[in-house]
Image: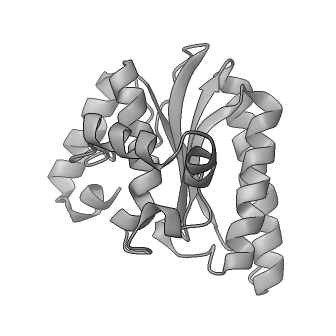
Amino acid sequence: MYDYRRMTPEERRAIVADRLNRGFPRHSPPHLEVPGEFRIVSGTCFEHRKLLNSHKRLGWFEEQLLNAVAEVSAPYAAWCVLPNHYHVLVKIADMKVFSKCIGQLHGRSSFQMNRDDDTRGRQVWHRFQDRCMRSEGHYHTTLNYIHNNPRKHGYVEKWQDWPFSSVHWYLATKGRDWLRDLWLSHPVFDYGEKWDL
């Protein structure tokens, strides 16, 4: 999304034409039907605005997200909720059902936040995107990416300092050594760069 905004009109036309040639929608991400695969699902506030702007709201949305995902898919493997986006690593059996669930979550949460902020009609979410895990290594790197996200964006110095993340479940059940070994064996590097192209 951000690279697109910096492109010239000619570059924009070329990127849209390429997407159409590959059978993708003009701008929104395609959600391919690949039943039973783990995927990273990422949802973003419109224009990356920090609308989940308090601990109370972050905790509320985390609960809404996890409850919604649990209704339509297998248990999630990891998650993180930040002021302007979220990630969840989850096994999805039916992408159409999952997409509908996320759409409803976005609708309900938008309505509630707009009511609370007295901003009726404001666009809160800008769709969501997903990527299937290609291997066990990709899965573990994704888990690290999700847990590292609050540190990457400068909200905390250490993963465990961010309360709205599955890292605390992993610390309690797997332990600090397991997480450290996972980080060393599956480093993030530039994971997540250029997802908008």
Quarter holding the N terminus is: bottom left
Residue at 24% of width from left, 41% of height from top? 15
Q: Give residue 62's position: percent from left, percent from top.
A: 70, 58
The answer to which of 148 and 123 lies nearer the viewer is 148
Residue at 62% of width from left, 62% of height from top? 164
The answer to which of 145 and 104 lies nearer the viewer is 145
Residue at 45% of width from left, 61% of height from top? 159
User: What's the colour scheme?
Assistant: one colour
Q: Give residue 93's position: percent from left, percent from top.
A: 68, 18
Q: Is residue 194 left or right of residue 67?
A: left
34, above or below 81, in the image: above
The answer to which of 164 and 60 lies nearer the viewer is 164
Q: Quadrant of residue 74?
A: top right
Residue at 74% of width from left, 27% of height from top? 97
Q: Is residue 182 left or right of residue 55?
A: left
Mark count: 0
Q: Quadrant of residue 94?
A: top right
Instruction: Say whether residue 27 is visible.
Output: no
Q: Give residue 101's position: percent from left, percent from top.
A: 76, 38
120, above or below 170, in the image: below
Q: Is residue 121 left or right of residue 138?
A: right
Q: Residue furthest bottom?
A: 118
Quarter holding the C terminus is: top left
Instruction: Say whether residue 75 is visible.
Output: yes
93, above or below 183, in the image: above
149, above or below 172, in the image: below
Q: Give residue 156's position: percent from left, percent from top.
A: 43, 74
Q: Quadrant of residue 95?
A: top right
